[in-house]
Image (cartoon, coloured by chain):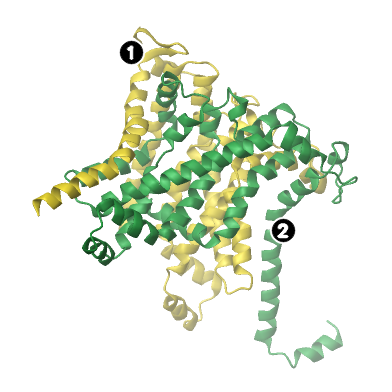
Chain colours: A green, B yellow
Amino acid sequence: MTAETVAAEQFIPGKARSDVARRVLFYVLMVGIAVVFFVPFVWTIVTSFKTIPDSVNFTLIPHPLTTEAWHIVWSQYDFELYFKNSFFLAAVIVSSNIFLGGLGGYAFARLKFPGRDLLFLLVLGTIMVPDQLRLLPIYVLLTNWHLINNFDGYILINLVTATNLFFMRQYFLTIPKDFEEAAKLDGAGHFKTFWRVMLPLALPAIGALTILQFQGTWNDFFWPVVLFSGNTSHYTVQLGLSNLHQLYTSLWPQICVGSIIAIIPVIVIFLVFQRFFVSGAVTAGVKG
Amino acid sequence: MLGARVSEAAWGYGFALIPIAVFGVFFIYPFIYAIYISFFHWGILGKQPGASGTYNYAKVLHDPVFHTALKNIAEYTVAVVPLELALGLSLALLINQKIRGRNFFRSAFYFPSIASSVAITTIILFIFSANGLFNHIFGFTTDWFGDAHTVLWSIVGLNAWTTSGTVMIFYLAALQSIPTDVYEAAALDGTGAWRTFWKITFPLLKPAHFFCLVVFGIGALKLFDQAYIVGGSAGGPNYATMTPILYIYNEAFANYDFGIAAAAGVVYFVIIFGLTVVQRLTVGRQEAA
């Protein structure tokens, strides 16, 4: 310890100094973890702009810097098509889950009909049915209906999930009944009350559902690999990436491009709707 | 008045009709149908004449590959779940401080959880390949995901990392529900941070521990995506990445033996269900007490 620091120490209360040191250490730790979390992604982005020979080098700046891999993957390897397929499926399934999950959720939350509670238990029970058991019967069923290698089959089995219906129901339960009574006084029927009053009031729930279901469908790998494997024109981005990786094990720039394309839409949605996402994930998980 | 009630009931059924039809046709009916298939010789051309009785079950239960799948998933789950929980809780404790850029750090730590498992696995395969960035920096030569001895543990590491963000979110919610006066009392007593954590915070988080154990335990038992990307549907190298779900997939779509696949599905369902019941009765009972 130098004379200067000893001199300085006399003017700094011991507690404050150790507090400052602790804070600095804390931020170094946080930034360090964040860096570790980001390194794989940064390296992927860097590699996506490299040439194949350059991709085995450990240089941080691509030399030469090229967008060739991007062009190849997007056009030649059909990721443009896969991207559209994934987006189409996600959009349709999110919409149908909002509408049907909302409709069913509203019925179970607010309308009285004989056998409602029993039916609701049955709905909740379907959450327990694991995919590995549904797999074969659904495959047999869709084969008989000629819906294998077909978007309709995939959409049909994902039309509405019990989790989403439950999620919407729980939200409807928190909305005061005054709104419906006011609508009824205005002469609105049950559907109009649902569509014009209740659904708009459930916007926060719809936001969370949209993000979680978009992520779920966009990232889904199990069902696309089962249902679309035999038809490349129906590949989703995840299936295309898995296939690209299997076929061209060492074409790292291309594989990196594919990975980025597979991640980006969910990141964009996450950044835009961050607040919905985190609270939605917790509510859906805790209550579902 | 009666008319209004009848009409409300009719609308109720009407609204719930399509969801219930979907759940009936694609969840409840398949559940029963899967059990039915498991008792027949069922190939690519459909059901073969004559029941097979318990033949499929006997075959699955005596298949060394199925045994390997069960052994792998047991090792994987026992290793990955405590790691996920420890990492997630640590991250949650860090984020729960009064810090600048809290939202940034939370998003950064959560990021791997929301990104597609196929993409993350592919990226990590690239970084951890024999000539990859990781080995370059740390001076190893191991092919982490290509060597039968290291591959399962590499998947443990990969998934502990990607899942820790989700675990963090659950623990954060639980941490924020702990009343602050508990900590104030501890501070007044002069209890240190380490002791406060183990004596106060950790026990108060018990419901969260239990919830995460169940949710992420069941999640771990369903390992498929990462195993498929790393080792293909055959669970290579040398069955080191074979998991029960992959076994079912493989029997169905590589061997086209639906009867065996269905029987394996039923067996595995019973195992998971049994584990959940045991967990409820042991950990759950303590939890309730």
Residue drawn at x 68%, y 86% is A14
Q: Is residue A5 above or below residue B65?
A: below
Residue drawn at x 73%, y 52% is A39
Q: Seen from this angle, which residue lies furthest front?
A: A187
Residue drawn at x 58%, y 61% is B91
Q: Seen from this angle, which residue lies furthest top?
A: B49
Q: Badge 1, how many Cα within 10 Å: few under 14, some, many 20+?
A: few
Q: Nearer the viewer, residue A106 or A217?
A: A106
Q: Badge 2, how many Cα within 10 Å: few under 14, some, many 20+?
A: few
Q: Is residue A284 above or below residue A161?
A: below
Same chain for mark 1 and mark 2? The answer is no
Q: CA distance from mark 1 to mark 2?
A: 57 Å
Residue A258: x and y in percent read 70, 39
Residue under label 1, please give it: B53
Query: On the picture, is B205 further left or further right than A119?
Result: right
Dot 1 falls on a residue whose secondary structure is loop
Task: Determine if residue A253 is in view.
Answer: no
Residue drawn at x 74%, y 41% is A256
Residue B25: x and y in percent read 34, 30
Quadrant into which the N terminus of chain A falls: bottom right
Residue B23, image quadrant:
top left
Residue under label 2, please give it: A35
Q: Nearer the viewer, residue B211 or A122?
A: A122
Residue B13, image quadrant:
top left
Q: Seen from this angle, which residue lies furthest right?
A: A64
Q: Nearer the viewer, residue A2 or B24?
A: B24
Q: Report the mark closest to the observer, 1 or 2.
A: 2
Q: Is residue A168 above or below residue A201?
A: above
Q: For the residue marked with disc 2, what is the amino acid?
A: Val
Residue A185: x and y in percent read 21, 64
